[in-house]
Image: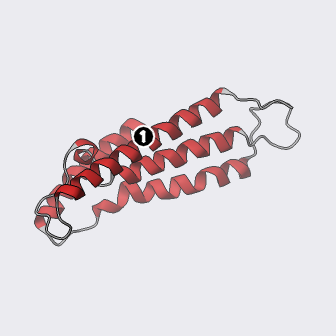
């Protein structure tokens, strides 16, 4: 039997690759930042590149990666005995997307907790506003 790749599989792989690129780029930018600034003695936040748009772009990239995996998984979860590939098993689909949904909830909505330091609170508020814009864009 040949492996059948449909458009959902291609979309899932594309989303996965975008997530991997975002995560890798953010990790490389953070590594470069850490090599210039000694740990524990940093007076400022990393606010360049992807880090100017998100407090944790590497986590965002990882979540995009997991959403890509979920898309591929859902594309392969047809109901047993289904005549077409559009008849998905609801239970299987729920299992495939529950982890990305749970993780994305925490990624997007946990930065609204109060911070003690005013500077950190201001930075978090600015980044949450940008992140909300990204959420609207993604949805």
Residue 125, percent from left and from top: 20, 55
Q: Is residue 106 placed above or below 127 in the rendered structure?
A: below
Q: Is residue 10 placed above or below 81 in the rendered structure?
A: above
- Residue 118: name its quadrant: bottom left
Is 55 left, or right, of 108 in this rendering?
A: left
Q: Is residue 124 placed above or below 88 in the rendered structure?
A: below
Residue 11, percent from left and from top: 57, 31
Name the residue located 10 percent from the left edge and 63 percent from the top edge: 43
- Residue 137: name its quadrant: top left
**Quadrant of the rendering where the C terminus is positioned:** top left
Q: Which residue lies furthest to the top in this view?
A: 7
Total tally of numbered discs in the picture:
1
Residue 42, percent from left and from top: 14, 64
- Asked whether 15 or 86 is in front, the reply is 15
Name the residue located 69 percent from the left edge and 28 percent from the top edge: 6
Is 98 left, or right, of 45 in this rendering?
A: right
- Residue 40: name its quadrant: bottom left
- Colour setup of the view: secondary structure
Q: Is residue 103 placed above or below 61 in the rendered structure?
A: below
Secondary structure found at label 1: helix
Q: Which residue lies furthest to the front in this view?
A: 35
Q: Residue furthest right?
A: 81
Is 82 left, or right, of 95 in this rendering?
A: right
Name the residue located 64 percent from the left edge and 33 percent from the top edge: 9
Name the residue located 24 percent from the left edge and 42 percent from the top edge: 49
The residue to which callout 1 is attached is 21
Residue 2, percent from left and from top: 82, 29
Q: How crowded is mark 1: few (under 14 residues within 10 Å), some or many (20 or more)?
A: some
- Asked whether 97 or 5 is in front, the reply is 5
């Amino acid at each position: 039997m040949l492996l059948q790749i449909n458009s959902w599989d291609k979309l899932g792989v594309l989303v996965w690759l975008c997530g991997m690129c975002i995560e890798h780029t953010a990790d490389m930018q953070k590594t470069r930042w850490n090599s210039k600034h000694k740990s524990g003695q940093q007076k400022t936040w990393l606010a360049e590149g992807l880090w100017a748009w998100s407090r944790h772009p590497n986590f965002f990239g990882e979540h995009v990666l997991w959403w890509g995996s979920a898309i591929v998984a859902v594309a392969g979860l047809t109901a047993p005995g289904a005549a077409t590939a559009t008849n998905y098993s609801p239970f299987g689909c729920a299992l495939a997307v529950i982890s990305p949904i749970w993780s994305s909830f925490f990624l997007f909505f946990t930065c609204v907790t109060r911070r003690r330091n005013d500077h950190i609170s201001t930075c978090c508020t600015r980044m949450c506003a940008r992140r909300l814009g990204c959420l609207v864009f993604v949805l």
